[in-house]
């Protein structure tokens, strides 16, 4: 347990924003697994929404636009909403913004999902305000009350999901109550359709002005990894 202003508590609060794991990395997540170790008697649920169904609900003309649109994702963008000092300079340097197509086709079944997250902050060819309004609207429509599943944890529960086709968020729980849920993340590979969302000219394209302060950051590693950490 940590106080409400502790870094760990603030990161947990950022995880209460709708997101898909690791969309801000050069090698985004394919799948995530949550394993419940310690659960509070109330609160601390995890909520899920299908971005595959969200894609299907969009008007045909908007789907056509988004299929060729690319959004920028930044780890610092979502955490800055909680506290501007939450992301360290080293983290900002090691996790520069990345750019992904807003539609991810699963090569195994041909299904397309809307690829967005709280980490997304800009869309190529759109003014910053317009892009952020569109991103907020897309997330709001994807996560409406009729389109989500709220999982109430029990100790020992394990949940696995596809990050290409799912938004999720943690829900708050009372201060002073312990909660420990372990996340295992599996990185996406070319076999998972990664090439279809990766822009061919990402290295040459200038970053949007909104994140101009990020210029000069190092490009992250492209190596596929698995990692474990505290999750929501």
Image (spheres, rainbow, N blue to C red):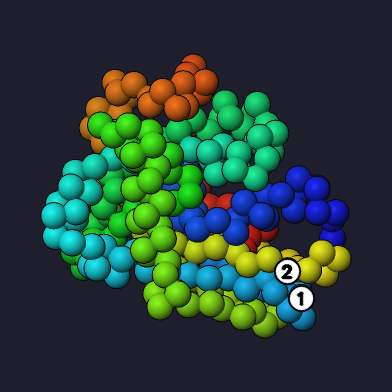
Q: Residue at x 37, y 64 (%)?
A: 142
Report the front residue among 146 and 23.
146
Q: In which quarter of the image is residue 124?
A: top left
Can you see residue 1?
Answer: yes
The residue mark sitting in front, 1 or 2, is: 2
> Is residue 46 toward the left or the right of residue 20 in the image?
right
Which quadrant of the rendered structure holds the C terminus?
Answer: bottom right
Tell me, yes or no, whether the two marked residues, 1 and 2, touch with CB atoms within 8 Å.
yes
Report the front residue among 145 and 2.
145
User: In the picture shown, does residue 195 fall above or below 106?
Assistant: above
Q: Residue at x 49, y 17 (%)?
A: 216
Residue 195 screen position, x and y as percent: 26, 44
Instruction: Identify the residue position indicated by label 1 in the image.
Output: 40
Residue 32 screen position, x and y as percent: 50, 62
> Is residue 101 toward the left or the right of residue 145 in the image?
left
Q: Quadrant of residue 114?
A: bottom left
User: In the picture shown, does residue 73 fall above or below 114?
Assistant: above
Instruction: Identify the residue position indicated by label 2 in the image.
Output: 173
Mark 1–mark 2 distance (CA, rounded to whole Å)? 7 Å
Residue 109 screen position, x and y as percent: 21, 68
Q: Which residue is drawn at 50% across and 58% down?
A: 18
Residue 192 screen position, x and y as percent: 31, 55
Nearer-N-terminus badge (1/2): 1
User: In the picture shown, does residue 107 fall above or below 144?
Assistant: above
From this viewpoint, which residue is outermost toward the top?
216
Q: Residue at x 85, y 54 (%)?
A: 3
């Amino acid at each position: 347990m940590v106080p409400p202003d502790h870094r760990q508590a603030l990161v947990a609060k950022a995880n209460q924003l709708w997101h898909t794991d690791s969309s801000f990395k050069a090698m985004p997540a394919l799948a995530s697994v949550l394993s419940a170790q310690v659960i509070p008697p109330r609160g601390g649920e995890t909520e899920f929404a299908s971005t595959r169904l969200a894609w299907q609900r969009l008007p045909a003309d908007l789907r056509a636009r988004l299929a060729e649109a690319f959004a920028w994702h930044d780890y610092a963008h979502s955490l800055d909403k909680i506290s501007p000092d939450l992301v360290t300079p080293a983290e900002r340097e090691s996790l520069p913004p990345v750019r992904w197509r807003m539609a991810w086709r699963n090569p195994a079944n041909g299904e397309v999902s809307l690829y967005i997250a709280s980490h997304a902050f800009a869309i190529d060819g759109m003014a910053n305000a317009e892009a952020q309004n569109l991103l907020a609207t897309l997330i709001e429509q994807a996560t409406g009350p009729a389109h989500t599943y709220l999982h109430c944890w029990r100790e020992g529960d394990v949940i696995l999901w596809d990050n290409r086709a799912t938004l999720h968020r943690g829900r708050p729980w009372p201060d002073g109550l312990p909660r420990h849920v372990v996340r295992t993340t599996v990185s996406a590979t070319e076999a998972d359709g990664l090439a279809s969302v990766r822009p061919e000219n990402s290295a040459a394209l200038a970053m949007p002005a909104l994140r101009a302060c990020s210029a000069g950051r190092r490009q992250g590693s492209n190596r596929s990894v698995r990692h474990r950490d505290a999750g929501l």
